[in-house]
Image (tube, rainbow, N blue to C red):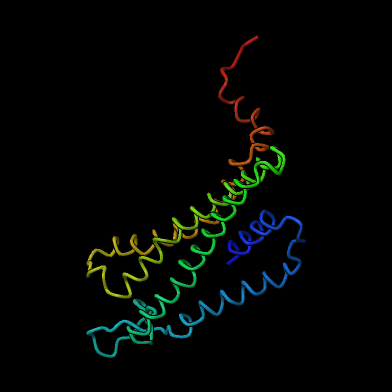
Amino acid sequence: MSLMFITFERWRAITCPLKSPLQATRFIVVGTWVVAMIMSSPEPYTLHLKSAEFRRPNFSSTWGTRCIASWSSETEQQYQIVLTLCAYLSPLLFISILCLNMSRTLNKCELTIGKRQLANRKKAVRMLIAVVCVFALSYLPVHLHNIAATFDLLGRDTDINWIYVRKLLPRVFSYSSSCLNPVLYNFMCSEWFFYNKTNLLIPLLPKVSW
C-alpha cells in the first residue's frame, strides 16, 4: 500500500502540478499499518499448537510441536485468493495504470515544459517503474506458493530439506524487495554516480609507484 500512495503522489505531481501535495502523511502511514494488520490478522487467530503424536504410550515431549490452522481448507483457499487479489494483483494493476498515464502525460508535455524538467520527471517515472517491477517479481513467488500449497498442488514430498527450501525461497524473494529498492534509487540516480565515481574508479585503476 505504501508503494500505491507513492505512485499516486508522483502521478498527482505530474498530471496536476499546480495542486499542493498530500498533507495527510501521518494518517496515510497509520492507515497503511491498520489495513495491513487487518488483512494479516486471520492467520494468527486460526493457528494453534499441536504436539506430535508418538506411538509410545504416556510419552510427552515438546519436540515436533507445530502450528496447525483451525479453519477449513475451503476457507483457507478463499482467504488466500482474496489476499492475493487485495495485496498483490489490485495494487499492481493500480500502479501500472498510473505509470502508463504518467508516461503518456510526459510525452504530451514535451513542448510545454523545459527539457531539464522533462528529463527529471521521466527519470523519476523510470525509477518508479523499476521499483514496481521489483515489487511484482519479488512478491509473485510467495503468492504462487501460498495458493499452490492451499490448493494442494505441490504434491507430497518426503525430502524435508527440499520442503524447507521450497518454503523459504518465496519468503526470501518477498523480503528482498525492501533491500533492492535503495539499490535502485542509488544506481538509477545520475547524481549518485557523479559524487561517487572517484570512489568507484580508484580501486580499478592500476597502482602507480613513484
Tell me residue 32's x, y (percent): 62, 71
Work out whether residue 89 or residue 60 is closer to the camera in this orientation and state it.
89
- On the rendered structure, is 157 left or right of 47? left
Tell me residue 167's x, y (percent): 36, 64
Residue drawn 53% across and 64% down? 94
- The furthest residue to the bottom: 58
Question: Is residue 128 depicted above or below 59 in this figure?
Answer: above
Work out whether residue 141 or residue 200 is closer to the camera in this orientation and state it.
141
- The furthest residue to the top: 210
Residue drawn 75% across and 60% down? 19
Residue drawn 35% across and 77% down? 63
Quadrant containing the N terminus is bottom right
Work out whether residue 162 or residue 172 is closer to the camera in this orientation and state it.
172
Tell me residue 210's x, y (percent): 65, 9
Work out whether residue 9 or residue 42 is closer to the camera in this orientation and state it.
9
- Count of numbered circles on the image: 0
